[in-house]
Amino acid sequence: MNKFILFILVSLALSEPDPNFHVYLAFGQSNMEGYGQIEPQDTANVPERFKMMAAVDFPSKGRKKGNWYTAVPPLCKEGNGLSPCDYFGRELVENLPDVTVGIINVAVGGCSIDMFDEDKVDQYVNTGPDWLKNAAKVYGNHPYKVLVEMGKKAQEDGVIKGILLHQGENNAGDKNWPNNVKKVYYALLKDLGLKEEDCPILVGEVVDKSVNGMYGYHNDVIATIPDFIPNGHVVKSNMLQSRGDNLHFSSASYREFGKRYAQVMLGLLK
């Protein structure tokens, strides 16, 4: 075989996405950003097969937007803590010995689902309070676009296998919330060229009313997600304690919650 042709074939093979590099997109508000205190057990022995793509720069950690790094928390932005993503990825790599897992986390504390709706985000941010405007600036006021941009970049390296959502406190009790989630989910599928049957969305419950969750009543709305999205799946938060504010989970609960997300995903992969 001609050496030049062989070189081209090898180059093409090397540039193909790795089917054993499973990428997950995560979005939502503060519980997805991560509010749990990061403890020594969370930064020690993070598996090399668990990666995060920085969706924004992390100057103090030397992380640059769009690059992959070992998934040492925080995974969303500087100043954040543990989130469900941390132990979601660890649980997956523990159960999938031939797979590398990558997370892309784009979340805005305190936001409505409208923050990720490209038809509504401009008005939502422009009419919002100053703290919301400041939070949105990190993503150029368009976190959805950043999520898609990073998702496309990740597809050069691996395969997007699912989407993780934790959001709803800001929309608590809104019966139309599942429709709004559905709109964002199908927009992601379209913009990233994904098939619904190959890319489920996993939606986590908020702090449950059984443990005095401030917005625990929204779990009744979250329970209806599979009625709106055939490949939508609910991740239960029962018995997961808050950090004391009845709104954000404790570090121990984030660890368990991430494992619950992973167990749902492992069931779907099988």
Image (cartoon, rainbow, N blue to C red):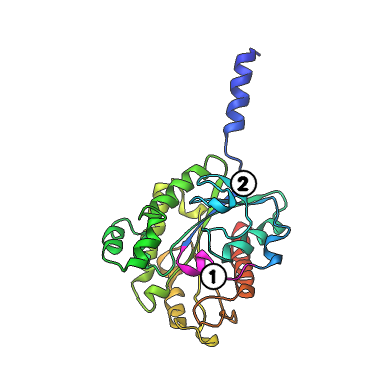
Say which residue label 2 marks: 21
Q: Residue at x 42, y 76 (%)?
A: 221
Quick one: 61 or 189, which is closer to the camera? 61
Q: Residue at x 37, y 61 (%)?
A: 134
In the displayed structure, would residue 41 be above or below residue 10? below
| Relative horizontal placement of residue 138, taking residue 75 as reference (left or right) | left
Give the residue type that dot 2 points to. Answer: Phe
Residue 256 coordinates in the image, percent (x, y): 64, 72
Comparing marks 1 and 2, which lies closer to the viewer? 1
Q: Which residues are magenta?
A: 28-38
**Residue 203 seen anywhere in this rendered image of the structure:** no
Distance, label 1 to label 2, CA atoms, is: 27 Å
Label 2 neighbour load within 10 Å: few <14, some 14-19, many 20+: many
x and y, in percent, of residue 237 in the image: 56, 76
**Is residue 194 shown left or right of residue 10?**
left
User: Residue 3 bears which disc, if any?
Assistant: none
Disc ID at residue 35: 1
Q: Is 103 inside the magenta-drawn segment?
A: no
The percent coordinates of residue 219 (x first, y second) are: 46, 78
Which quarter of the figure has residue 43? bottom right
Residue at horizontal 55%, vertical 83%? 244
| Quarter residue 119 falls in | bottom left
